[in-house]
Image: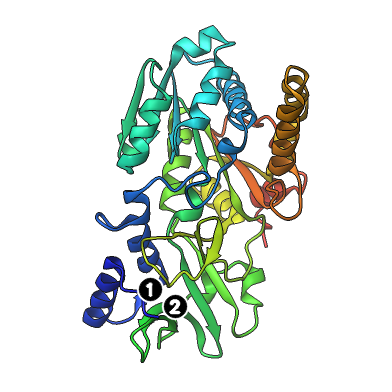
Amino acid sequence: MIDQTALATEIKRLIKAAGPMPVWRYMELCLGHPEHGYYVTRDPLGREGDFTTSPEISQMFGELLGLWSASVWKAAGEPQALRLIEIGPGRGTMMADALRALRVLPILYQSLSVHLVEINPVLRQKQQTTLAGIRNIHWHDSFDDVPEGPAVILANEYFDVLPIHQAIKRETGWHERVIEIGASGELMFGVAADPIPGFEALLPPLVRLAPPGAVFEWRPDAEIFEIASRVRDQGGAALIIDYGHLRSDVGDTFQAIASHSYADPLQHPGRADLTAHVDFDALGRAAESVGARAHGPVTQGAFLKRLGIETRALSLMAKATAQVSEDIAGALQRLTGEGRGAMGSMFKVIGVSDPKIETLVALSDDTDRAAERRQGTNG
């Protein structure tokens, strides 16, 4: 059955007028179209939405990120004013939990100004409700609008929805993957006729060895450049948490999620979340290429355990009923464990800091990826 959503009609009109559409442009329209875009029109979170993020699973997640932010403040020399910035702050749950934890440090808490970067009017209204009563809080349409100064920047499940390019390897080279209209009028994947000029030279060595038919995904570096340049020039650090892979490699991860289940990304444009795995290796290289320092990546499970999530869970369980204790234990397993439904190994964490900050709490790199990047031996 051909989907006739308003956005599907618009996308087909654009393809008929200009030819096949690159995957990145399709993803950009599905998520950010000013009238019909998924992230402009709805609250996608929670049981009634399409997916659940870590802050919605347990208060422990945001609390620990608050304490991590305090460690950055100390590493940065305890600046008198600190911007606490969240990009894509959902319902404001994570920020509320982080700020509650930060109240144990009155000197830091009083120095904070809170900045939320949010384009979704539905979510912005919910954030205002969640964070009612918080002093010195500001909303911004873009990261550029946040005032200058030392900062801690938090981005949880933000990079995965930034539009991706996809290329498919053929005997003739790497060709961009596109969206076109099939014989029956449906949207379908296709491949650009001409290869991407000089593309092979830009690829990590491991990807160059891929066989024909392999798919490589990449995102432009603009967002990570902006974050890395900010902390390089003004001090502080950023923390990026998302699902993805530690090392650049081939693989098609473009997917749609609706009602907590996977869906066809070409069906129901604008009505499902479109995502793709984050390449943490590429993020680290990009950050260091502009003079910032990258820390990690490590798995979310390792990161949270190093921050003391197990001790925090036991503390909460000691004061809770049997049912609530069971819920806390379940949340701990989901955030740090492995296997179906667990996020501990699927999600990764990377820090980006002012180069004068040599280490960041809980982000020592067991795989020595940071050392490889700095020695120029990444592959």
Q: Earlier in the sequence, mark 1 or mark 2?
A: 1
Q: Position of residue 230 (x, y in %)?
A: 43, 36
* Residue 45 in the image: above or below residue 277: above
Q: Residues within 10 Å of mark 2 (few under 14, many from 20)?
A: many
- The tally of labels here is 2
Between 53 and 86, the one lying in front of the other is 53
Mark number displayed over residue 177 = none
Between 371 and 2, the one lying in front of the other is 2
The image quadrant of residue 213 is: bottom right
Would you say 195 lies left or right of 333 here? Answer: left
The span from disc 1 to disc 2 (Cα, nearest Å) is 7 Å
Q: Position of residue 181 (x, y in %)?
A: 34, 84
Q: Residue at x 64, y 67 (%)?
A: 249
| Mark 1 touches mark 2? (CB < 8 Å) | yes
Type of residue at label 2? Glu
Q: Position of residue 51 (x, y in %)?
A: 53, 50
Between 151 and 65, the one lying in front of the other is 65
Camera-near label (1 vs 2) is: 1
Type of residue at label 1? Pro
Helix, strand or loop under label 1: strand
Quadrant of the frame with the C terminus:
bottom right
* Residue 168 in the image: above or below residue 62: below
Would you say 265 lies left or right of 346 here? Answer: left
Q: Residues within 10 Å of mark 1 (few under 14, many from 20)?
A: many
Residue wearing tag 1: 22
Residue wearing tag 2: 176
Q: Residue at x 51, y 90 (%)?
A: 172
Between 34 and 126, the one lying in front of the other is 126
Q: Residue at x 31, y 34 (%)?
A: 140
Q: Position of residue 339 (x, y in %)?
A: 76, 54
